[in-house]
Amino acid sequence: MTPTAGGRHCAACEKTVVDFTSLTSEQLLAALHQPEKVCGRFRPDQLHAPALPASRAARNWTQWVAAAAITLSSCGTPDALPLQLRTSPVTVDGNYVLVRGKVVDKTDGRPLPDALIISLADTSFRTTSDSTGHFTLKLPQQLRDSLLYAVGHTSPQGYTQGYIGRRLRPEQTAEIRLRPDPNAGVLGEPAPVTLEAGEMRYPLRLLAPPPPPPRLSTVQFPAAESAGPTEDSVEVFEAP
C-alpha cells in the first residue's frame, strides 16, 4: 500500500483506503452513506452496528461495514484488524454469567471431550466439555473478567494428561485450541518443552468433596427379663 492524500492506495483492490479509526459513530455513519464507494480501516468497536433504530440507514450501516471488512482482508495491510473467534459472557441474572465455548485439538481440530475448564481465581467454579467439545461454565459476576484455565484429558485426581494447559479470559473461549503434550505417555525424565503464548503447566489436584457427616439415630433393644427397665435406648452412628 502506498501513501496518498486521502489515506493509502491498495494495489489489490485499486482503491484508496481511508483511516476511519478517529471518527465518532455519527461521523462514520455519515461517511459511509456517501455515494462514492470507499475502503476503510476501522477500530474493533466500529465493526458493530451503532445503537440506532432499525431503519434503512441502520441496515445500510451493517452492509457497508461487512463490505469494508471483506475489502480490508483482501488488501493484506499489516495493520488490518484480525478476525478472531470470540464470545461474550451471557448474563443469566444479576449475579451470574454463562461462559460458553468449545475445546479442540490444535493439530487436527477434533473436539476434546472431558476437558477441564476452571476459574483460576476460584477453583470451585469449573466444568468439563461434552462429547462434542462444547462446555458451559457459570461464573459469578465478580469473576466474569478473571482468568480461566483449560486442559485436556485430565484424570480424576486432576493430573494433566495428553495436552498442555492454556490460560485465557472468558471472551476467548469460542474455540480453545490445546496443543498435545510431547511428553504424554513418556516414562522417565520428561524432555523440556517450550511453552507457547498463553500456555502454562498447572497440574491441578482437585480434592474430592468431603464425605457427608454420619447420621445419628436411636435404636431400641428389648430388655432382658432379669433386667430392671423393660427396654434400653442406645445411640449408634450409621456410616453414610
Image (spheres, rainbow, N blue to C red):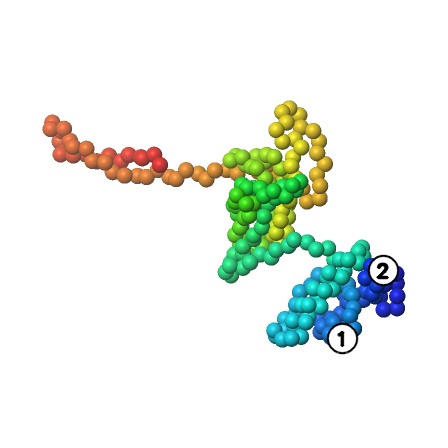
Q: Could you say where residue 97 lies in the image, as x and y percent from the top left?
A: 54, 56
Q: Position of residue 225 (x, y in %)?
A: 11, 28
Question: Where does label 2 land, which residue?
Answer: 11
Q: Earlier in the sequence, mark 2 or mark 1?
A: 2
Residue 178 visible? The answer is: no
Q: Quadrant of residue 129?
A: top right
The residue beneath circle 1 is 34
- Closer to the camera in the image, 56 or 25: 56
> Which quarter of the rendering shows the N terminus?
bottom right
Residue 113, placed above or below residue 1 = above
In 3D space, how far apart are the residues under numbered discs 2 and 1 (Cα atoms)?
A: 23 Å
In this view, 163 is above or below 1: above
Q: Is residue 219 left or right of residue 66?
A: left
Amino acid marked by disc 1? Gln
Q: Nearer the viewer, mark 2 or mark 1?
A: 2
One can see residue 25 in this view: yes
**Dot 2: element:** loop
Local packing at callout 2 (Cα closer than 10 Å; few below 14, some 14-19, many 20+) is few
Question: Residue 30 or 204: which is nearer the viewer?
Answer: 30
Residue 193: mark in rendering: none
Q: Nearer the viewer, residue 150 or 82?
A: 82
Q: Residues within 10 Å of mark 1 (few under 14, many from 20)?
A: few
**Residue at x 72% of width, y 64% of height:** 67
Residue at point 61%, 73% (across, down): 54
Question: Circle 1 — which element?
Answer: loop
Callout 2 amino acid: Ala
Q: Residue 175: x, y in percent? A: 62, 49
- Residue furthest to the top in view is 188
